[in-house]
Amino acid sequence: MTAPQTGFELFTDRSIVAMRVNGELKDLAAMVTGSDTVEAVTLDSADGLSILRHSAAHVTAQAVQSINPEAKLGIGPPITDGFYYDFDVVEPFTPEDLKAIEKAMDRIIRQGQRFVRRVVTEDEARAELANEPYKLELIGIKGHVGEGEGSTDDNESVEVGGAELTIYENVDGKTGEVYWKDLCRGPHLPNTRMIGNGWKLQRNAAAYWRGSEKNKQLQRIYGTAWATKDELREYLERQEEAAKRDHRKLGSELDLFSFPEEIGSGLAVFHPKGGIIRMEIENYMRQQLISHDYELVNTPHITKAHLFETSQHLNWYREGMFPPMHLDEEVDDEGNITRQGQDYYLKPMNCPMHNLIFRARGRSYRELPLRLAEFGTVYRYEKSGTLSGLTRVRGLTQDDAHIYVTADQTKAEIASQLDFVFETLRGYGLDNFYLELSTRDPEKSVGSDEQWDEATETLRQVAVESGLELVADPGGAAFYGPKISVQARDAIGRTWQLSTVQLDFNQPALFDLQYTAADGSRQQPVMIHRALLGSIERFFAILLEHYAGAFPVWLSPVQVVGIPVAEAYDDYLRDVIGQLKSKGVRAELDDSSDRMAKKIRNATKDKIPFQLIAGEEDKANGSVSFRFRDGHQENGIPIADAIERITNSIATRAQV
C-alpha cells in the first residue's frame, strides 16, 4: 500500500493550487493515499478561481481587522467573477477606506502567509471566536444550513457546510506565528502570495445579515480576483461596458420605466416608450404562440389558499409568496362570526390555474398535445436585498405555458419546444445559446426515483440531440421535476438564463388530471412547463442591455424622426411623416425651435433608428436624406424608396 502523502508531494506544478479527492475539493496540504481518486485543480480552472476568490475574501477580512480590530466578521464567499465579505462596523466604509484596505491586503499577499486548516470541536470554535457574534450564530446552525429566515445555502456553507467545523489560520511561513483566523470550510490557496496581482476591491454596499430585513444591516465589501493581471484588466473593461449598458441607467435616460416609491419595492411602471417596447415584445410572442398551435388563456391574480395547498406550493414555496389576505368573513351586530373567512393569496405561479382549465371538462387523447399559454402576472415576495431593477422584481408577467401530452408524445414535444424557443429568441436578436440540465435535489423533491430517472434521461437525450453544449446543474431542479434551461449570451458575452422546459409528474396526479385514451381508458397526462422569455420584465432588461438601448427598428418606441433644415420645410416633412404613420410606422416630426444640429443630437441620444432630413434640394426633388444612428448619412433618397426601406426593415425585423 502506498504511504499517505500530501498534495504538495503529489503535485509539483506551481499552477496547481488544490485537488479533488474522491470528488471533494481539498487543500494541497491534505493527505491522500493510493486508493484515493485525486485530480489536480489549477488556478485558472473554475474551481481554482473560486478558491482564489475565497482566499482573497479572507485576506480582505484580515486587512479590515488589522485596520479596525473592532470590526465583526460576517460571511465571505466567492461569487460569480469575484467575492464579498460582510462586516459589522460603526461607520460605513468610504472610498478612502477601501484604498487603505487594499494597501493592507497587498502587504498580506506579499508576505506569503500560509492558509492552515484546523479541525475544531464546537466548544473549541466557540471559545476561539467568542468575540465574533455572527460566527457563533453560524456555529449554532451547523447541520441546518439553508434553514431559517433569509438563509442562503451557498453563503453559509462556505463556513459550516462541511462534515466538520474547521478554522483557517493565516500563518507566517517561517516562524509559524498566527496572524489571523476565521471559521471556514475551505479549501484555500497554499499561501497568500498565490493571490498574485489580478485582484481589486470594487465597492461597498449595505447588506442585511443572512439576507433578512429582520436582522442587522452590515457593510459588504465587493472585490474581484483573476488568475492574471491581464484577465483582471479584461474583466474591468467588460464591467465598464456593462455599466454603460445597465438597464436601470438606460431606462431612466430613455424614459422607459421607473419604480415609484409610492407603489413599493420591486414593482415597476412602464412609461409610454417602454410600454411600446413591451407591447412589441408581447405581440411577437403572441404571433409565435398562435402559429405554433398554442391556445391563449387568462387567469386571475389571486386565489383561495386551497388551490396552492393542492398544488403543494404552500408546502414548497411559501417563503416566496406574499402573506395571505383573510377575506369573506361575516360578523353580526354583536361581533359574532356568522360566516368563516378564508385566506386568499396573490399567485406566484400560473400552473395550478391552468390545471383547472384542463380539468374543466372531459379531455380526449385527440386534443393532445394541449398547449395553454398566458401572459400571466404573478407576485413573489423577493427579499429587498435581492431586488435589482427589472431583473429581480416582486411583480412580474410570465410568458407562461403548460403543455399536456401523452407519455409517448413527451420526447417529441420537448424537442419541438426547444426548436420553438430557439426560433423565437433568434427573432429578438439572440442567437448564441447553450443548455443546462437541472437534476433532482433528493431533499427538495417529490416523486419516485423511477419517475425522476426517466424524466431526466428524456431531457438529456433531447438536449444532446439539439447539438448544443450541455452543462450539468446537479440538484437545481424544481421540486416537481427536472428541467432544461436555455442560456443565452448577449452582445458583450454575458450569460443569461432565459427559457426553461420542465417535466412535471406531480401536479397531474395532485389535480387528478385525466384524458380518455384511444382504448377508452382514463389516463393521466404528462405536464410540461415552458417559460420562453422567463418574465417580460426581466427579458425587457436583457434586451435593453443587449442592444445598449439602440433597439432594432421594429422594437424602437420611435422609429423615425423628421428633422427639417429650417422651419420652411416643416410641412414638407410633415407630409412624409404622415405617410409613414398611415403605414403603422412610429414616426414624429421635430418641429421645435431648436437648431437642426441640436435636433440631430437629441435624436441620436434617444437612439432613434432613422432620421429623415429635408431642405430645399430635397423638397425640389421629392426626396429626403437618411441619417442613421451610427452617424452615416445617405442623401437624395426618393420619398417612396425611403418609406419602403423603413417599412421593410420593420416587417423583416431587421437588426438595424
Image: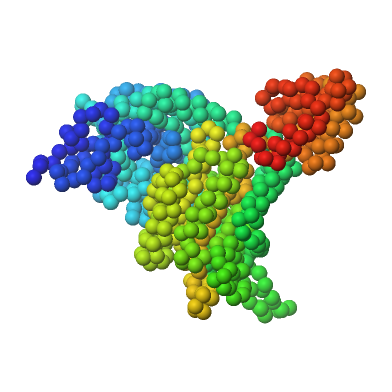
Q: Would you say 256 lies left or right of 324 here?
A: right
Residue 614, horizontal then vertical, whole percent = 83, 24
Q: Residue at x 69, y 22 (%)?
A: 631
In the image, is residue 248 above or below residue 230? Answer: below
Foreground pick, 609 / 316: 609
Residue 654, horizontal then vertical, whole percent = 65, 37
Q: In which quarter of the image is the N terminus?
A: top left
Whether residue 415 appears in this view of the structure is yes
- Which quadrant would residue 113 be assigned to in this image? top left
Q: Which residue is drawn at 70% across and 36% down?
A: 649
- Which quadrant would residue 250 be assigned to in this image? top right
Foreground pick, 349 / 156: 349
Q: Would you say 619 lies left or right of 114 here?
A: right
Q: Residue at x 21, y 45 (%)?
A: 37
- Which quadrant would residue 370 be assigned to in this image? bottom right
In the image, is residue 283 above or below residue 188? Answer: below
Whether residue 73 appears in this view of the structure is no
In the image, is residue 150 above or below residue 585? Answer: below
Q: Would you say 274 lies left or right of 577 here?
A: left
Q: Residue furthest left?
A: 1
Q: Would you say 333 lies left or right of 356 here?
A: right
In the image, is residue 365 above or below residue 157? Answer: below
